[in-house]
Image (tube, rainbow, N blue to C red):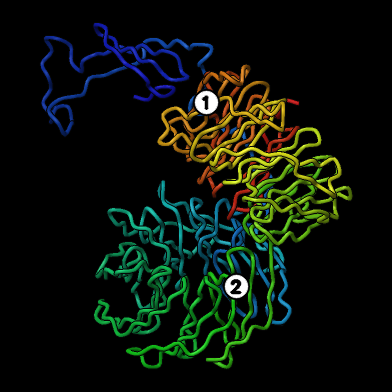
Amino acid sequence: MRLPGFTSGICLHRDHVIAAIRYGGVAVMRYRPATMPGTPEPSPSQAGLPSPSTPPAIHVASHLWLPLLSRSWPPDPVLRKVNQYGGALTAVAIDAGYAYVGWGPRILILDVTVPDAPRVIGSSADLGDMVHGLDLAGDRVVAAVGNAGIVVVDASDRASPVVIGKAALPDLAVASGIRVVGNVAYGVAIGLGLFTISLIDPKNPRLMGSYETFPPSLFQDVDVERNLAVLAGRSLVMVDVANPFAPRPVASVALSVVPMAVDLNGDRLYMVGGDAERSGLWIFAVEDAALRELGHLALGGKVSDIAISGGRAYVADATGSLRVIDISDPQNPRESGRVEARNAGKVAIEGKLAVVIDPEGGMELIDVSQGDRPRRTGSHRVAGPMVTVGFAAGRAYVVDRAGTLRVMDTEAPPGSEVTGAVALGVSTYDLAEMDGALLVAAGEAGLLVVDIRDRDRPRLMATLKMTGEARAVVVQGRTAYLALGSGGIAMVDVTDPSQPVRFAGWSDGGDVVSVDVAGNWLFAADSNQGVRIVDISDTNANRLVATLKGVDALDGGSSKVLVRRGIAFVVCPRCWDALQVYDIGNPSRPERLGGARTTGGGLALDVHGAYAFEGDSDGLGVFDVSEPRIPHQIDYQRGTSVVDVRAVEGGRVFVAADSGGWLVYELDSGLPQ
């Protein structure tokens, strides 16, 4: 039976079972045999049971909630997503001069009829998860949307595409690829295998059949032709889909490399795969539902996608090019041309035009009319994966992986929130706000200072280079403290933000990735040694006084530290309790108060009032920390990797979700002022 929480202890007393429930108090359950003493046990046929006995019955006789531990179970969501912007470019298709691109959890539509000047004309609503694949069916776009399953978008009005249908997949299945043939969508899902969706009624797509692999394979691409589907996972799997209600496997080909993408073209199968050390193109003959290798070409680089057109294979290479392969002799394919395409991830071709997308937000339009001499004709950039977020003067500031800082009006309706931008052009890890300026921890570029006095027209006004890699920054008064990795801690005078001056530092040879300051005490999170507490009352003689070692840690390392009202909150990714809480009333003798398990390893953290917001590789967790000795999770928003989070007054939470872009949540109960 289900109890209102995690059972942390159990004992028997006569005919009772007593269970201690973490955060749920104590439950007393009565044990009662299935039959009373002296009563003949019915036969299976009389009882209608498949076994000769009935399991004993247990029911809760009483339940005592302990006030300090009580909580609702399962937790009710407390966060509501209200906006999203940007994200990785993940999939592309082209038809009739229009390109359809997976953009984080949305579908972006571009007019590419003039290749020299592509322009965005429309974008779908947030589809609920990352778009991992898409295909076209007339005026409709069918998308494989991760945990959200399959989504059908009506794009007949390309300026205003609308969601018209959704089909859920079984629990834990993550839709990762899709192909549409007629009125059937053939998809692959991580954790499931192949599935088929009926599109006869596009407003009510429904799951028809599936072929499940065991153990589950990481399928990420599929192609279909003449009732045959080929799945790309750890191997190539061929599935007969003549009856879409009952797909059945017919062959499997084990490979020495991991397939990345497949293109089934007539009686030929083209596959690219491998890694930076051994990648290439393989060509197979499809014969009687079996595959026979015809030819192979080693390519090097990092190939990720393939498209066949005009007797040539066009291969996207993430190391920076679109490569042209002459496949006229399938037993001896040869590279015949290439064109620069930054971080090429996916490619789609229609007629003389190829569209190549860069996951970090770029699109290249390439003229392939000359076959072996492709020529880049146009390009376009959008906001890519987001890496850090800040808030100041009523504006959110978010930086994408390409190094562009954007100003976001958090009160504006979706689609009009970007009010300004400045290209920093460098990797960025953290932001800190001070009057009229943003301080940016910019990796090897050091400290950048951005003038935000005109809040919708930010401009870079100063750069301070230093030893190490700037990973985090915090401001106290007129001093900025930077975590510099192997360079330790730098203390910078920002009295005049246009002329920052480093005046002191501290290092013990570790790897400092996060920093916070409270009065005369500095807290440095070291990825290997835990949190170091340093007395900075005399900046000429900074002194290490204590270390917060993660309890139950594999190595004690920490990725984030925040100090609030005499309490230190620490993220320890390799600890049993990844969120840990310490009393630092006496910093030289800190005391661990409590901890909580998190869903993932812990990448980001912010604390506001009674709530802690912890980001990990799968999403965002919300913890009640009103009682520091028993912090506990009250919500979890699953999605893409959360690399930065900032909670502000009024109940808003801003998230940099890497491939998922910039997210805005509202806390139902609001945040304490």
For the residue pair 460 and 97, the one nearer the viewer reads as 460
Q: Would residue 159 be found to the left or right of residue 532 on screen?
A: right
Q: Position of residue 296 (x, y in %)?
A: 34, 82
Q: Residue furthest top?
A: 14
The 10 Å Cα crowd at callout 1, few under 14, some 14 to 19, many 20 or more, is: many
Q: Which mark is residue 632?
A: 1
Query: Where's residue 193, x and y in %?
Result: 35, 59
- Label 1 residue SS: strand
Is residue 355 depicted above or below 63 in this figure? Answer: below
Could you tell me which secondary element the residue under label 2 belongs to? loop
Question: As shown in the figure, which amino acid type bears the numbered disc 2?
Answer: Arg
Which residue is tagged 2?
A: 342
Percent of width and height locating residue 372: 53, 91
Which one is in front, 493 or 393?
493
Closer to the eye: label 1 or 2: 2
- Mark 1 vs mark 2: which is more N-terminal? 2
Marks 1,2: beta carbons within 8 A = no
Please report the residue visible at 22 percent of the width from the left and 20 percent of the height from the top: 56
Q: CA distance from mark 1 to mark 2?
A: 44 Å
| Rendered position, 452 above or below 219 | above
Quadrant containing the N terminus in the rendered view = top left
Q: Amino acid at mark 1?
A: His
